[in-house]
Image (tube, rainbow, N blue to C red):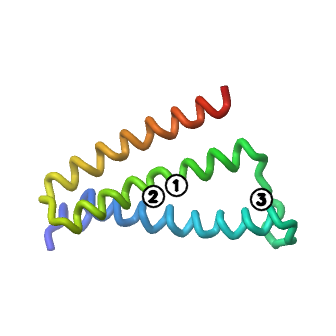
Amino acid sequence: MDKERAYGTGMWAWLLQRITGFLLVIYLFLHVGWAHGISTPFDFLFFPAPLAFFILILLAVPHALNGFRVFAVDFGISQRTQKILFWALMVFGVAVIIFSCYSRFS
């Protein structure tokens, strides 16, 4: 396996998907616990609503858009197209995050 293939865009996309998925699961359990008034060892992490919204958007948008990329990969798009799609979706994701936070907090 050559070096670029091992440490290329696909590896970073895979890592991003796993990290955001793991953090979304943690966020989900904390959110449900706090919403129902359950005391957890993580109560010191209680976020105010605007920060919780920002964290949710920051995790959910890249995770969802990378999921669309994985869906396209399953249909057999070329490796070059995968790279272009990954970066295009990440730029689109940054725009969505900025727009959603701007519209929510202004």
Q: Residues within 10 Å of mark 1 (few under 14, many from 20)?
A: some
Q: Nearer the viewer, mark 3 or mark 2?
A: 2
Q: Position of residue 89 (x, y in %)?
A: 33, 46
Q: Is residue 25 above or below residue 88?
A: below
Label 3: which residue? Answer: 45
The residue lying toward the viewer, choosing from 6 and 59, is 59
Label 2: which residue? Answer: 63
Q: Who's the residue at 69% across and 70% down the image?
A: 29
Labels 3 and 2 touching (C-beta < 8 A) = no
Query: Which badge, 3 or 2, is on the more N-terminal residue?
Result: 3
Labels 2 and 1 touching (C-beta < 8 A) = yes
Q: Is residue 36 above or below residue 90?
A: below
Q: Residues within 10 Å of mark 2 (few under 14, many from 20)?
A: many
**Kind of residue at badge 2:** His
Side (left or right) of 35 relative to 53? right
Q: Residue furthest top?
A: 106
Q: Quadrant of the N terminus?
A: bottom left
**Kind of residue at badge 3:** Leu
The residue lying toward the viewer, choosing from 38 and 13, is 38
Mark drawn on residue 41: none
Side (left or right) of 14 relative to 101? left
Query: Which badge, 3 or 1, is on the more N-terminal residue?
Result: 3
Label 1: which residue? Answer: 60
Q: Who's the residue at 55% across and 36% down the image?
A: 100
Measure the C-alpha gap from mark 2 to mark 1.
5 Å
